[in-house]
Image: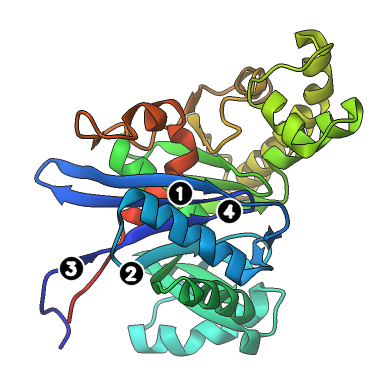
Amino acid sequence: MFGRGKPQALTGLDIGSTSVKAVQLKRTGAGYQLVAAGMEPLPPNLVVDGAVVDAQGVAEKINTVFSAQGISSTGVATSICGHSVIVKRLPMPLMSEMELYDQLPIQAAEHIPFDVADVSLSYQLLGRSDTELDVLLVAARKDRIKNRMETLARAGKEGRVLDVDAFALENCFEANYEPHPGELVALLNIGAAVMNINIARDGAPLFTRDVAMGGADFTEALRKKLDMSFEEAEQLKTGGTSAGVGDAQHDAILRPVSERLVGEIKKTFDFFRATSSGQEISCLFVAGGTARLPGLPELMRLELGLPVDELNPFRKILIPPGHPNEIALRVGSAQFAVAVGLGMRTQEAS
């Protein structure tokens, strides 16, 4: 029966295009405590455009990170993003919950570029006024969901919660920061292939967008210009050195990519303002492996005219002293934002 039993904690599992990240948390009286967290790199082309191409290869990497971190539970919360997921905030006439459920497919057909028969629909009622409902509609392609669930099954895991990257990012932010009531905050997760943008207020997403651009674009620019391997370019991008490549040349190669990325963010913010009565964003928090790319935060501040801070997913999460990954997590914590947000999800026990 519903409502019985203690909620079961789930392991947050973020499957990206260049790595898998797993985070296990424990609820405490003060919030959350870290139990385990780890990352395992993925070889190129195992995950392309958010779809798992080699399920067995990814499954093996999932098991590697679970084994390395001593995670024995099989229940996971994972997420998807990209063009296969559509998130729309819709005003709808006042109606009952049952009527809303019946009307959802009709509304979805008008607002998503897929056949309704090919997607799974979900929604959240964000609020209501005297005349209408404020509804958040989420549509995800069934083939992408099947792809993700089959990969988890190959790894012997149970996908008990399927979230959206942008929502997991917001969960992580809300648990670690305390924005002022009514404050508009922009959350940015720059993954290897996709950048998630979420504009939120009071714990509710107002506008989300996924942009097919990320850290891999910077790596590719270095690889092409300097005629080096992917591995060499990736190392150079993340702070390594290469013979004959000075800081000026490095920055000159990456600057145009940074400008394109910031241009996409600015375009998103401008569209949001134009469609939301000119509401102003107060600040931007950046997560993901590219959050610390030299020069990028400064360019964001300059072009967007906003305070820009790195999102720390462990800001209010207790990492026990002496935890084997404590130093690594403090240094590279921005990469774990989505996985931490997923690790906060629970499943009601029956």
Of the image marks 1 and 2, the number of the one nearer the N terminus: 2
Q: Comparing marks 1 and 2, which lies closer to the viewer?
A: 2
Q: Position of residue 257 (x, y in %)?
A: 79, 31
Q: Comparing marks 3 and 4, which lies closer to the viewer?
A: 4
Disc on res. 16: 4
- For disc 3, the neighbor class at 10 Å (few under 14, some 14 to 19, many from 20) is few
- For disc 4, the neighbor class at 10 Å (few under 14, some 14 to 19, many from 20) is many
**Quarter of the rendering containing residue 38:** top left
Residue plotted at (64% across, 26% down):
238
Question: Which residue lies under the disc numbered 3?
Answer: 7
Question: Which residue lies under the disc numbered 1?
Answer: 338
Q: Amino acid at mark 2?
A: Thr
Q: Amino acid at mark 4?
A: Gly
Q: Amino acid at mark 3?
A: Pro
Question: Relative to 264, is 22 above or below?
Answer: below
Residue plotted at (40% across, 88% down):
99
Q: CA distance from mark 1 to mark 2?
A: 19 Å
Tag 4's secondary structure? Answer: loop
